[in-house]
Image (spheres, helix red, strand yellow):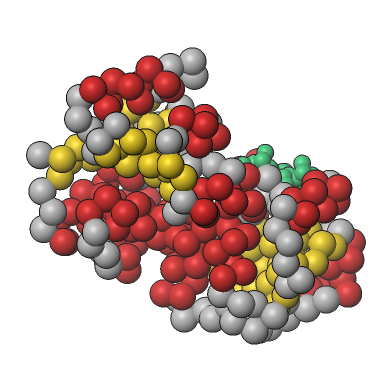
Amino acid sequence: MDTYFVLGNPIEQSRSPFIHQQFALQTKQSMQYEKQLVALADFQTVINDLIKNSVKGANVTAPFKEQALALCTQLSARAKMAGAVNTLSFNNGEIIGDNTDGIGLVNDLKSQQITLKGKRILLLGAGGAARGVILPLLDEEPEQLFIANRTLAKAELLSEQFINDRISVISFEQTQDYQFDLIINATSASLTANVPNISADCITNKTVCYDMVYAKQATNFLLWAQSNDAAKVIDGLGMLVGQAAESFYQWRNVQPDISPVLVKVRKQINAS
Ligand code: ATR
């Protein structure tokens, strides 16, 4: 039976085995998917062992996504642009790297009937999470993709890697001069219960606010958006299921249905 892993440190909390098992059941694929804790110095050794044991592929999560990229013999364009790999396929001695995080976000938004074409999007953050979604967002042809970051210079550096006139960089303070259709929080602020210090004026009752972080309770960013009358707030659980669906598709060549699995994972989290 074909075997896959998710590798990370920590890994205990990972929902990926459940999600992939659900996809496998849904699409009648015979496969197994396990999680493995990898010691910080052992990533390369673990990958070599997986290949030796004829494992077909692996998802990679923090903190190994950049190391995974460095090990690949082939990379997709989106992995190159993201500067990180979350999906590895082992095939005849080749290590093929992809990054499905950005497409996972876009597919989640689409499945929630949020169109991006012609829209004004504000992306908060300039770290790895923001970088990974820029190309897939641009592919949807928004009117403009604004990138704002607490440290403005980092956003400027990031934007220079994507030569595209749909991208504008603004400071947190400048957000008061704009109104957005969609605001995506790709900062890690929610992990410490913080809210990026942007202006509430850029939210209207038509603005959708998305936090890449998910938790049992709404993040402080989503609560803040709600209290400023955002049209809709969405957490990152759908992005998690969406990126898993795209990895599954890369490995199995079958596209699973995201929605029923998202409902099940949400139930699991609420019950935990
Ligand atoms: P990741 O890989 O999750 O993107 P990262 O590369 O460490 O993590 O980047 C973290 C991002 O969250 C950065 O954009 C950071 O802003 P700075 O570049 O100014 O440090 C942002 N961030 C973290 N905590 C924040 C906070 N409390 N408010 C606003 N932005 C924050």
Q: Is residue 33 visible?
A: yes
Question: Relative to residue 92, is residue 6 drawn left or right?
Answer: right
Question: Relative to residue 43, is residue 16 drawn left or right?
Answer: left
Instruction: Find residue 73 and report its horizontal and vertical position in percent.
Output: 43, 36
Quarter occupied by the N terminus:
top left
Question: Relative to residue 91, is residue 246 drawn left or right?
Answer: right
Q: Is residue 3 above or below residue 208?
A: above
Q: Quadrant of ligand 1?
A: top right
Q: Is residue 248 above or below residue 260?
A: above
* Residue 47 figure quarter: top left
Q: Considering depth in this image, is 107 or 163 the residue closer to the camera?
A: 163
Q: Can residue 209 be seen in this view?
A: no
Instruction: Find residue 137 and report its horizontal and vertical position in percent.
Output: 59, 67
Number of on-image labels: 0
Quarter occupied by the C terminus:
top left
Q: Considering depth in this image, is 111 or 89 the residue closer to the camera?
A: 89
Instruction: Find residue 155 and report its horizontal and vertical position in percent.
Output: 79, 52
Q: Residue at the location (76% across, 71% down)?
A: 165
Q: Residue at the location (37% across, 36% down)?
A: 95
Q: Residue at the location (43% across, 17% down)?
A: 42
* Residue 44 figure quarter: top left
Q: Is residue 3 above or below residue 136?
A: above
Instruction: Find residue 194 and report its horizontal and vertical position in percent.
Output: 71, 48
Q: Considering depth in this image, is 216 or 7 the residue closer to the camera?
A: 7
Q: Is residue 249 above or below residue 231?
A: above
Q: Residue at the location (46% across, 75% down)?
A: 110
Q: Considering depth in this image, is 128 or 213 the residue closer to the camera?
A: 128
